[in-house]
Image (cartoon, coloured by chain):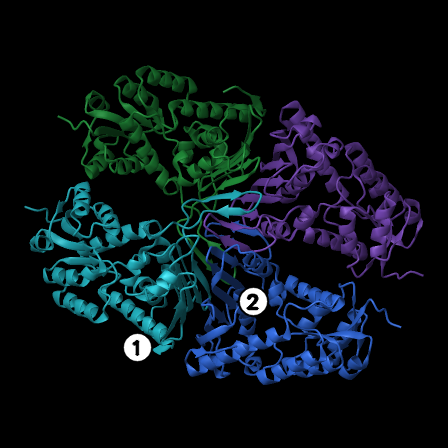
Chain colours: A purple, B green, C blue, D cyan
């Protein structure tokens, strides 16, 4: 007989992000990691062993009534299928972005979730970052009046392998999907026009893969608020994740986080640490807080902050941006 | 008989910027302010009196062989005419931006200057700002490799009167012309595509004047470099003039300048000064340095850093941006 | 039969710091919290219950051969006795500072530890703070040459109750003991002269308790390096923990840590968060890292970074500083 | 016949600081530089020539009724004599610090000034620095309540030649005299105890000259406020001039000034400019503002902010500090 106060959890995907989620969820007093599923058996075994869980198949997991929730951190092409099967089995779902690279399929998923009436949270972890969340809270509290302009800087330290890029769905779905979610979250409205452009300065590999490494996107909301996003697949100085909001009464900035507060003054310059190295470090707290939020929602039956609908909206913006870039024109939309 | 080592100067315009230029040029060891011309006689007299100069008419100034240079700081609609007449009279010319609100007329001016073979410098003072100039020098020295992305933030503390806006030529020619010059100067290439959009959030007066208060512009150069400019006619916290350049090897940022380095820590926050109040304060050094540069060029016969051609290029970009905004589409161009 | 790969741990003290240590040590893969001891039974039970441990007496703990280590976070007057008894029982010891308010008694403790040959680590957690530790590492790597001057700022947000102050041993033993440890750690030498002065500006309660709220201490090492420490029992803006080291080739600064990187620009100022509220927040990572270091040492038989000898040296400096302040004179010493 | 609205000025000393003062005073609408006096004739001629003044002797200057004010920037050993002779001649006096290396002689000077009833301002230019002056104004406005602790950091980029040091009067009179003035100005009270110590880490030349290169001074005021000053003759990163005041309601910091606001992010660090190189750059505005203040006082008959009495008080503190250092003890005083 299982402990009813405790939610049995199965984790799909024993890679980098799977490990992060496992370490965070075992800390939740009401979550118990029971299964790890991964096509790569040794990875599944290693992660399961670390937390006293078992390796299992998707079928075993979904058939076990002791499993109340699934955490999906497997490869993108498995997300939609796992969401639909988990929803059908009545499990609460936490899934990494994106729902699917195909918007139609993602909508189909959302429909399945709605029908099943299960919780489905998408891993837009940035909304849980302490700095970003504090900014949002202060914005909502009216500290700078009405938001008018949002400037988002979002740069990776170095590009993934060309093979990854070729199957990534393109920079707008792979990277900017997070920034599109920030746009919707911060400005609190949907886009009525999207313009995207870009290129591959000094990155011929990305061009060869049919994608762009540097993008500049402009969005306008129904209310007339503007958003500019700039992204690149490479920043020599590291991972750059900043945004700022101009409001009618001031400006709110969310800056990078540094590993330490050491500053050195020498005969050349005054210098401080570079930003946290990459997303695993930069969003360490955010990953912990989003999993906590998910299990709190499962336990208390409350709603989640980043729904599958949010996942679809961001995907739709990525699709429109891709089209804008390909066709070299601004696109009016109603998302 | 006049002192041949000394350049007699006439100043057109005794307003705010005319006063700045007068105070700066009298410090140059080889410049001598002889005349002040202004349609508002009391202003002309006050400024002339302050520096031991005389009030005169345009005709008197241009007919006086002792006048080697003119500084034009009068209203925009007088620029083109004064430039052409001064050029015809063989005077060296320093003129505030823009050359003219009409691009054709500005080109006509440039042609007149070329034929006359006189020096004609346009007052893009930002290039002389110590912070901006140091950034450019370090960029040129290769400190961050090749420039790939430029982000420009350019916000005024408060809008001018509605009457001014109505005759300003629009936000792109009136405000962003400086930012278009920054784009050309920093990225060192011309635009092949321009997209501009904007609105008037919370500023109905600007909308009523047929203009926008907030603009978002994206430019792409032939080399694939990207530029995003964001501007607004109002920033509750003051005058905001920053830009940053992402290069293949790093990032260079040019920040705002603060009046003092005082920081206060109290029971609420840690806080520092707002940026310098407006352009007269922010670009105090830049105004002094551009005038020094102009007279150095006149004395030594060297070329000036901001030519009338630069003035026309920026104007052309403003025109294309205006069209892009009005037509709601990205425009390919060859400037 | 107990798991030999696992160290049974007993925790003395179920207060604020005891809770912190418990939460950190249960995360160590080789540490198992078995007992909680506290004179206040409900606190002991609550903490024990939270981590699946039992409430016990000192005698029970020390008699249990399954206990390999004790963590002492009970009140200061119990430290010396517990250290000596745990040492006699052959347990590895982690003890909060100070060893004792009486230097002679502390030395007696250290002698007992030496004879028993057990590990005894004192909780100078600041050495484990990521910012402070990174500074030390860079200093040791020669980044600023030889250290010459150390400036330490150490301010509490608000004073403890007068009753606490009266039995605290005075500000030098209670607060500055940490700063004396920083002095020894950073400059790597012992003091040959100590001067301390201070007062109670606007804090009559502290004066009434026979103590001072604000202190200024100067130390000089045998090598001629200087150290200035400034402390206060109250800082309106919060907990202030900074230091900087001037070396022959530069300066290293360790700054405060802020909860978030949000900056707001409004019509008055540009402002950022105050520092982390107090020691539990500021040294959150440091507390986790020192406990990890302790158990790593116990498991691997390696030495600890903050020994009982360090505890005694800092105490001796506090004693000399107290004397200097009371007698109003600089004191030469050989510690 | 001379222009009565204009003050004829004679400048003693055509060295580095003399040049600064000359350039600043010629900008004052009511000051006219008429004479330059210097034992080194070519320097006097060069500076006089630059500003249309004449080279003269002390006697000529003091005998000329057209001279209303003298600016003394000659070597320290000439100050007292020139002050007394100028006072006797009824001239307004601006003199660089110190009045004299000998306190008795300085007091004698002050007496002469009082008897003559002339204005005598001492060049404590730091009080006129925009950052320091803004801090003082905000302190006086009660922004952080009552001042309780002042921490002053004052470091030169590199030591003067050993020959200079040998005749400088020692580091306390030569360098810290400015910091003692800051102490009196900021805390607004006199010292009741002084403790000074120091050494010559890595600077054997300074030790050989009988002086110290690094000093740590602690002062306590009658009101119980504390001040710690740290100084060094060498800082690898440049000129370091900062102070901070802890008050009952907060903290005010006065930071260094940087030449530009450029920040570079590269693959190692994020870095900004070093502070302004040395006093001529750091206090450029302060030098201009103090001269303006002096001539305003002369023209309007108002009092000056830094009197000869301030000069003597700072000198007295330097003398007590020197004694404290030499004797290795704290000294009670009543200055």
Q: Residue furthest top?
A: B115
D141 displayed left or right of B295: right
Quadrant containing the N terminus of chain B is: top left
Q: Position of residue D36 (x, y in %)?
A: 16, 49
Q: Position of residue D72 (x, y in %)?
A: 20, 56
- The answer to whether one can see residue D14 in this image is yes
Q: Chain of mark 1?
A: D
Q: How many marks?
A: 2
Q: Read off the residue under disc 2.
A: C185
In front of the other: label 1 or label 2? 2
D319 displayed left or right of D231: left
B257 displayed left or right of C307: left
Residue under the point 51% across and 58% down: C253
Res. B162 image quadrant:
top left
The answer to whether B73 is drawn above or below residue C305 in the figure is: above
Using the image as rendered, state which of residue A204 and residue B121 is in the foreground: A204
Badge 2 crowding class, 10 Å Cα cut-off, few under 14, some 14 to 19, many 20 or more, is some
Using the image as rendered, state which of residue D68 and residue B55 is in the foreground: D68
- Label 2 secondary element: helix
Q: Which mark is residue D334?
A: 1
Q: Chain of mark 2?
A: C
- The answer to whether one can see residue D190 in this image is no
Q: Which mark is residue B275?
A: none
- Label 1 secondary element: loop
């Amino acid at each position: 007989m299982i402990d009813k106060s405790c939610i049995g959890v199965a984790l799909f995907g024993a890679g980098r992000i799977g490990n992060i989620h496992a370490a965070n969820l075992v800390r939740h007093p009401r979550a118990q990691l029971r299964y790890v599923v991964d096509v790569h058996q040794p990875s599944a075994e290693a992660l399961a062993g670390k937390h006293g869980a078992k390796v299992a198949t998707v079928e075993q997991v979904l058939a076990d009534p002791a499993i109340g929730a699934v955490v999906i951190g497997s490869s993108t092409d498995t997300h939609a299928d796992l969401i639909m099967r988990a929803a059908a089995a009545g499990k609460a779902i936490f899934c990494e972005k994106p729902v699917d690279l195909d918007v139609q399929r993602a909508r189909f998923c959302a429909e399945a979730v709605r029908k099943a009436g299960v919780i489905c949270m998408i891993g837009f972890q940035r909304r849980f970052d302490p700095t970003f969340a504090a900014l949002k809270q202060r914005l909502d509290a009216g500290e700078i009046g009405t938001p008018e302009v949002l400037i988002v800087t979002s740069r990776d330290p170095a590009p993934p392998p060309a093979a990854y890029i070729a199957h990534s769905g393109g920079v707008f779905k792979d990277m900017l999907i997070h920034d599109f979610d920030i746009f919707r979250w911060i400005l609190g409205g949907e886009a009525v026009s999207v313009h995207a452009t870009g290129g591959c300065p000094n990155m011929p590999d990305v061009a060869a893969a049919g994608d762009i490494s540097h993008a500049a996107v402009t969005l306008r909301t129904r209310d007339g608020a503007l958003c500019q996003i700039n992204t690149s697949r490479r920043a020599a100085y590291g991972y750059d994740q900043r945004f700022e909001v101009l409001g009618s009464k001031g400006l709110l900035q969310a800056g990078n986080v540094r590993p330490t507060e050491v500053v050195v003054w020498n005969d050349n310059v005054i210098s401080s640490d570079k930003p946290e190295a990459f997303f695993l470090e930069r969003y360490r707290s955010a990953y912990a807080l989003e999993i906590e939020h998910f299990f709190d929602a499962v336990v208390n039956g409350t709603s989640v902050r980043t729904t599958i609908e949010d996942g679809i909206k961001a995907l739709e913006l990525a699709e429109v941006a891709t089209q804008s870039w390909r066709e070299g024109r601004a696109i009016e939309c109603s998302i």
